[in-house]
Image (tube, helix red, strand yellow):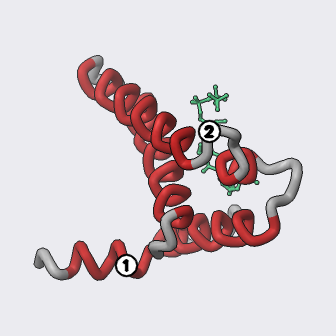
Amino acid sequence: MDADTPDDEVLDELFSTVESRKAELPEDSYTTTLFTHEKGENYVLEKIGEEATETILAAKDDDREELLAESADLVYHLLVLLSMKGASLDDLRAELRERF
Ligand SMILES: N=c1c2ncn([C@@H]3O[C@H](COP(=O)(O)OP(=O)(O)OP(=O)(O)O)[C@@H](O)[C@H]3O)c2ncn1[C@@H]1O[C@H](COP(=O)(O)O)[C@@H](O)[C@H]1O
């Protein structure tokens, strides 16, 4: 990801990076470890559960900084799961838009 990416393009840039990690599986990448874990998709499902719990605990503690950090971890792992299951950020946007 590029630090100069405009805020409104950050999610697209992150998802595109995740998709590229899935295609290329570089060795020095955390995302690669999620796509290649011996537990398969169960590992990313566990991570989502952990990050959701940590997000809830941060909210209960009224710890805004921790809430944002854990929310970012949660969103990142959710994007990896969507990619793993062949869904895209556009699919997610379409689902949200249908609810307007
Ligand atoms: N946004 C993220 C991101 N958010 C969270 N994480 C990782 O998710 C993990 C969070 O798990 P934990 O809090 O449990 O911390 P941990 O104990 O280190 O993790 P485990 O050992 O339990 O797996 C940490 O290792 C974080 O580094 C992320 N790893 C990568 N990205 C982005 O993904 C892109 C690709 O990164 P690489 O795949 O590493 O090249 C880059 O743009 C990164 O900024």
Q: In this view, which residue lies farthest toward the right?
A: 27
Q: Image point 45% across, 35% down: which residue?
A: 70
Label 1 neighbourhood size at 10 Å, few (<14), some (14-19), many (20+)?
A: few
Which quadrant would the C terminus be assigned to in this image? bottom left
Instruction: Give x and y (percent) for residue 23.
Output: 74, 71
Which amino acid type is shown beneath numbered disc 2? Answer: Lys
Instruction: Give x and y (percent) for residue 82.
Output: 47, 63
Label 2 neighbourhood size at 10 Å, few (<14), some (14-19), many (20+)?
A: few
Instruction: Give x and y (percent) for residue 38.
Output: 69, 40
Q: State the mark number for residue 56.
A: none
Ligand 1 placement by image quarter = top right
- Could you say which is closer to the camera, residue 82 or residue 74? 82
Which amino acid type is shown beneath numbered disc 1? Answer: Asp
Judge left or right: residue 92 versus residue 42.
Answer: left
Judge left or right: residue 45 versus residue 99.
Answer: right
Whether residues under marks 2 and 1 lie with C-beta atoms below 8 angstroms apart, the answer is: no
Q: Which residue does the numbered mark 2 point to in the structure image? A: 39
- Could you say which is closer to the camera, residue 67 or residue 6? 67
Q: Which residue does the numbered mark 1 point to in the structure image? A: 91
Which quadrant would the N terminus be assigned to in this image? bottom right
> Disc 2 vs disc 1: which is toward the camera?
2
